[in-house]
Amino acid sequence: MSNMHKLISNFIVTGIALLIAAYIVPGFILNLDNLTAFLALTAIVTLINVLIKPLIKFVLTPLIILTLGLFNLVITGGLLYIVDIYSKNITISGLSSLIYGTIIISVITTIFSAQNRIKY
């Protein structure tokens, strides 16, 4: 699978994960009035997950190992919180909304990445 194909797949899965989190979690609100704004938000979250998240995970590998991988949720939640601060297209009201939204997005993207690694 080419890198461009992986990036497009990650973009689609991130968009779906954001939509599911917004649908299920009260207080996790996306601005869906403007399709362009939603696509831009999805692109930003995708690029953060592809470019910045691996660097943070590399630096914090000891904490990830000590917590048996649970610190990955903290990293994802922190990045999602930063996106919430700087973007008008997503609103996360409260810590519980951030936690549940992070769990949903992490589970969906993990399932997708596991599917991508399976060789048929």
Image (cartoon, rainbow, N blue to C red):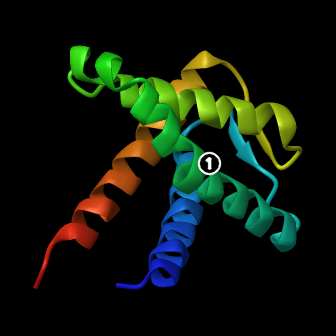
Q: Quadrant of the C terminus?
A: bottom left
Which part of the image, by quadrant, shows the N terminus?
bottom left
Residue drawn 50% across the image and 39% down it = 55
To which quarter of the image does residue 62 belong?
Answer: top left
Figure check: 2 above or below 93: below
x and y percent of residue 82 in the render?
72, 31
Question: In the displayed structure, would residue 17 be above or below residue 69?
Answer: below
Name the spot of residue 78 as percent of width and height, x first: 59, 27
Who's the residue at 20% across and 22% down the image? 68
Q: Is residue 2 left or right of residue 83?
A: left
Instruction: Specify whether residue 23 is in view.
Output: no
Nearest the camera: 89 or 55?
A: 55
Location of residue 15 (image quadrant): bottom right
Nearer to us in this view, 26 or 84: 84
Horizontal side of residue 15 vs 60, given as left or right? right
Q: Position of residue 100 (x, y in %)?
A: 48, 31
Image point (88%, 67%), residue name: 34
Say what amino acid the circle numbered 1 marks: Ala
Q: Secondary structure at mark 1?
A: helix
Which quadrant of the view contains residue 28? Answer: top right
